[in-house]
Amino acid sequence: MQEVVLEIVENKPLSSQIYQMVLKGDLTAIKNPDEFVNIKLENFYLRRPFSVADFTDSSLTIIYKVLGEGTKEMTSLPRGTKLNVLIGLGNGFTEFSQHPLLVAGGIGIAPFVKLIKEFNERGIKPTLVYGEQTKDNFVLLDFFKMHTNLYLTTDDGTLGFKGNSVEFLKAHSLEFDKYYACGPMPMLKALTNYSKDGYLSLEARMGCGFGACMGCSIKTINGYKRVCKEGPVFKAEEIIYE
Ligand SMILES: Cc1cc2nc3c(=O)[nH]c(=O)nc-3n(C[C@H](O)[C@H](O)[C@H](O)COP(=O)(O)OP(=O)(O)OC[C@H]3O[C@@H](n4cnc5c(N)ncnc54)[C@H](O)[C@@H]3O)c2cc1C
Ligand code: FES
């Protein structure tokens, strides 16, 4: 973990609720897609955690959904704003299979940009099943169309398969060796019931964000583990849903 000061170089809407923020600075402490960073916002006591969507040694991209007061304030931050950020948090995706299936639900799409680039650099075009409530919520579709074999699902049927991503998988039996999934807990639970051959990126309410408070613990077959320290990525077979 490293505490750095980063400067906002871009902060723009991708849809009505989802924004992309690009920050520059020393980002050499970030090693893997879907590590996370913890951002200090003025006027807020607790930091806000966000997945690393993309990164280089000098640039970090996060994709965030406006949810409460903190993320609302983030949308108003102009270019040039300096933010105190903890980086190099969590494990991220560290294993890269030959026939990957990526499953994203809603803002769970965020960590997949860098993961897709990592697969492409290995000569692999991953399959991506990307689910949203309705068609206007999708982001970065041009990028995903170009770099993945893309399937879209919507709850209301306005684009792609009508239903959620797990219902789509059950209907189409796509071939894969490992899946990589990020999205709401009910989606991850349904996916685990469908197959345990994969990795799940979990979210939990966080206190410290770096392993000290146990506030983000989840139950696994190997005892309680901290989402911020041993996660956020876990083997699907490990998780015990309560
Ligand atoms: C490891 C990890 C990665 C995440 N990656 C992303 C991402 O890439 N994009 C994105 O849009 N969101 C992501 N989230 C969720 C994001 O942290 C929350 O949406 C955000 O903190 C909400 O802040 P707020 O002030 O707008 O909402 P409020 O509800 O006002 O927040 C109140 C408090 O609850 C905490 N909180 C609220 N929702 C969550 C949540 N889902 N998880 C953890 N803490 C929460 C906040 O940090 C804050 O301390 C991630 C969460 C975790 C744990
Ligand atoms: S948030 Fe404190 S241990 Fe994870």
Image: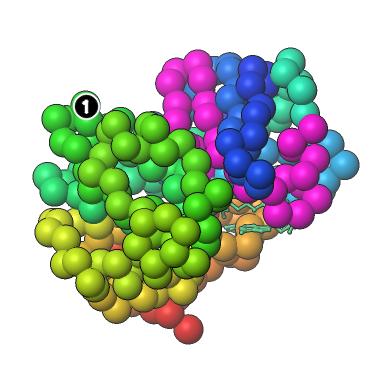
Furthest residue in direction bottom, as rendered: 242
Q: Nearer the viewer, residue 184 or 60?
A: 184
Q: Is residue 81 left or right of residue 58?
A: right
- Res 3 visible: no
Q: Position of residue 182 (x, y in %)?
A: 42, 56
Q: In the rendered structure, does residue 157 fall within the stretch colored magenta?
A: no
* Residue numbers of the magenta segment: 51-76
Q: Within the image, what quadrant is residue 98 found in?
A: top left
Residue at (63% x, 62% y) in the render: 205
Residue at (44% x, 64% y) in the render: 157
Q: Position of residue 184 (x, y in %)?
A: 50, 65
Q: Is residue 78 left or right of residue 8?
A: right
Residue position for label 1: 121
Instruction: Work out whether 56 lies above or below 206.
Output: above
Q: Position of residue 8 (x, y in %)?
A: 67, 21
Q: Within the image, what quadrant is residue 190 found in?
A: bottom left
Q: Check disc 1 and report its element: helix, strand or loop.
A: helix
Number of marks: 1
- Amino acid carrying mark 1 in the image: Glu
Instruction: Work out whether 186 lies above or below 64.
Output: below
Furthest residue in direction front, as rendered: 158
